[in-house]
Image (cartoon, rainbow, N blue to C red):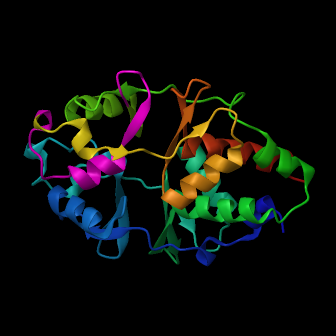
């Protein structure tokens, strides 16, 4: 079975749907962030009784990092309401379409109107990476799409860079202002030495650091992140993201300096285009 047949025919309930925590709508923002950090999850589903009323993700958490005046408020004040959901019997391809159409990385899964799980982009990326590794198809179009196409003709997000001795408020401001999920850390030669993501902000700052100007980038960054060159096949980025649980992979030019960032959303949009092209 090809990768795209797998996406189109696999019900979401066949995948790991456990990547989330649940909180009530009255739970404080600080307690919600602590629960997400303790369990290593990037998504909290907010319930009113048994009913799903919202979702709070690491992107939402970025709004409250370094803002202690918000931490005691109920999570209902900062959650994203009117959540887009998926039925348990829909396919992984349906979930991928929701992620690209709605610009989300988590889709709550409902069965008979009740929350039964969360479809995470990490889970979808792992499924795709397994297909890429296995080379389980002889379909020429899929081989070209994953193994031969590189990033030289890919539409990449421009890199936003900071220095390790900058303070964390600089990185958080850049991610908030540009609505991006990561910034690259470079040295004086503009060589990549680290990565700061929304997840880093959630887990390493959370609702614990009141003044972001007192913490340096070096204190919270992921050092020596996995990166691929612009001439690397898309397959290399997919496998790297799945293995490390990354949502972003830096792309390096011929000089070894970053020229862009490939996000899950970039690759998901590409997958959707491929699905449409290969549809009967």
* Residue 153 among magenta residues: no
The foreground one among 67 and 83 is 67
What residue sits 29% from the left and 75% below the top?
Answer: 49
* Residue 193 among magenta residues: yes
Q: Indicate whether 71 appears above or below 67.
A: below
Task: State the image coordinates of residue 107 (x, y, percent, origin top left).
Answer: 50, 60
Q: Visible in this render: residue 117?
A: yes
What residue sits 91% from the left and 50% below the top?
Answer: 140
Task: State the image coordinates of residue 93 (x, y, percent, origin top left).
Answer: 69, 59
Task: From the viewer's perspective, tell me whether residue 280 is left or right of residue 155.
Answer: right
**Residue range highlighted in magenta:** 186-213
Q: In which image quadrant can residue 161 be found?
A: top left
What residue sits 68% from the left and 65% below the top?
Answer: 130
Q: Indicate whether 43 appears above or below 202.
A: below
Q: Visible in this render: residue 24?
A: no
- Total marks shown come to 0
Task: From the viewer's perspective, tell me whether residue 18 is left or right of residue 279.
Answer: left
What residue sits 65% from the left and 65% below the top?
Answer: 127
Task: State the image coordinates of residue 104 (x, y, percent, origin top left).
Answer: 49, 49
Q: In which image quadrant can residue 101 be found?
A: top right
């Amino acid at each position: 079975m090809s990768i795209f047949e797998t996406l189109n025919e696999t019900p979401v309930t066949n995948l790991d749907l456990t990547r989330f925590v649940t909180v009530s709508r009255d739970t404080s923002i600080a307690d919600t962030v602590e629960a997400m950090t303790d369990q290593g999850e990037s998504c909290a589903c907010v319930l009113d009784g048994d009913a799903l009323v919202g979702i709070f993700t690491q992107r939402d958490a970025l709004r409250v990092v370094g803002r202690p005046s918000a931490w005691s408020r109920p999570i209902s004040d900062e959650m994203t309401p009117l959540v887009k959901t998926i039925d348990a019997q829909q396919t992984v391809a349906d979930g991928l379409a929701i992620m690209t159409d709605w610009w989300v990385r988590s889709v709550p899964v409902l069965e008979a109107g009740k929350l039964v799980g969360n479809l995470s982009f990490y889970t979808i990326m792992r499924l795709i990476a397994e297909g890429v590794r296995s080379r389980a198809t002889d379909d020429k179009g899929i081989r070209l799409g994953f193994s031969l196409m590189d990033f030289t003709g890919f539409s990449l997000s421009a890199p936003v860079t900071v220095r390790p001795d900058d303070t964390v408020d600089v990185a958080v401001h850049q991610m908030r202002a540009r609505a991006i999920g990561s910034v690259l850390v470079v040295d004086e030669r503009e060589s990549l030495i680290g990565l700061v993501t929304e997840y880093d902000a959630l887990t390493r700052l959370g609702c614990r650091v009141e003044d972001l100007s007192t913490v340096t980038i070096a204190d919270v960054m992921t050092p020596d992140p996995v990166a691929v060159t612009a001439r690397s096949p898309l397959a290399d980025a997919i496998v790297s993201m799945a293995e490390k649980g990354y949502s972003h992979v830096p792309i390096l030019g011929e000089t070894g300096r970053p020229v862009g960032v490939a996000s899950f959303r970039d690759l998901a949009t590409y997958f959707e285009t491929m699905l449409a092209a290969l549809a009967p």
